[in-house]
Image (cartoon, rainbow, N blue to C red):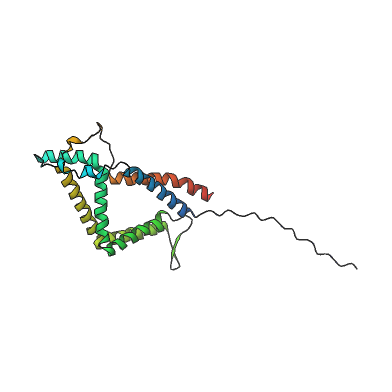
Amino acid sequence: MSASVPAALPISGTEPVETQPPVAISAFRAFLSRLNDSLRNSLSERRPWPELADRSTFSKPESFSDATLRIRKNYFYFRVNYLMVIGVTLAFSLIFHPFSLLLLLGLLFSWVILYLFRPADQPLIIFGRTFSDLETLGILVIFSIFVIFLTSVGSLTISAIMLGLGLVCAHGAFRTPDDLFLDDQEPAATGFLSFIGGAASNAVTATVPTIANTRI
């Protein structure tokens, strides 16, 4: 009898599978890219700081209405510089209170990691318990209320913003805007909240195609 030859096993060619980054990482990178572009565009509109601090342009306002008119004109001209002053005031206040800074950063990263950029197909699991999106949102809202209203973060943030607004209003009231070149139509929606809203909408526009392509 001839020895039986074992049948050859078919060998299928294996093609390298291209790994894609998680949806959360792709969305977060797109959000940071859009936010960076919006921030650069906003900073490009700032006025020279020597023009802001020119002492020859300061004078006492004649009346309260004159002061409010000066503040309005100076704001539309130095709006980016004023927002930077408020931001620096808030940053210094948080730096000198590291505990409040850590709480605020923890709150921010909690929203970013656990809710905003968490993939929809990956539920939140803590200590073996699975939390739905509604439960996660409720926990984050309760945590936000605790951090803002039951710690020093809320009072510190409000105090820093009020101090920055006081500096801005004092500068705008005492600086004569006669030498400023103002457009005929004052731009609308140029504040900090509109900037955040525009950056967020741009980030959502950029991340939706990324999430759709990754899930496909």
108 to the left or right of 185: right
Which quarter of the picture shows residue 185? Answer: top left
Q: Estimate the x, y position of residue 49 in percent, counting from the top left.
A: 24, 45
Closer to the camera in the image, 146 or 27:
27
* Residue appearing at x 22%, y 42% in the figure: 51
In the image, residue 184 sits, relative to residue 198, either above or below, namely above
Tell me: 38 left or right of 183. right
Left or right: residue 175 compared with residue 141: left
At horizontal 18% and vertical 37% (from top left) the residue drawn is 177
- Look at the picture and state if 52 lies above or below 182: below
Q: x and y percent of residue 67 in the render?
A: 13, 41
Which of the 4 image quadrants contains residue 118?
Answer: bottom left
Q: In the picture, which quadrant includes the N terminus?
A: bottom right
Instruction: Give the total number of marks visible in the rendering.
Output: 0
Q: Nearer the viewer, residue 89 or 124?
A: 89
Residue 138 falls in image quadrant: bottom left
Q: Is residue 141 visible?
A: yes
Identity of the residue furthest to the top in this view: 184
Tell me residue 168's x, y (percent). Answer: 19, 47
Q: Nearer the viewer, residue 32 or 202?
A: 32
Residue farthest left in this picture = 62
Residue 163 location in percent, x, y? 19, 53
- Residue placed at 23% from the left, 44% from the top? 50
- Residue 142 visible in this rendered orientation of the protein: no
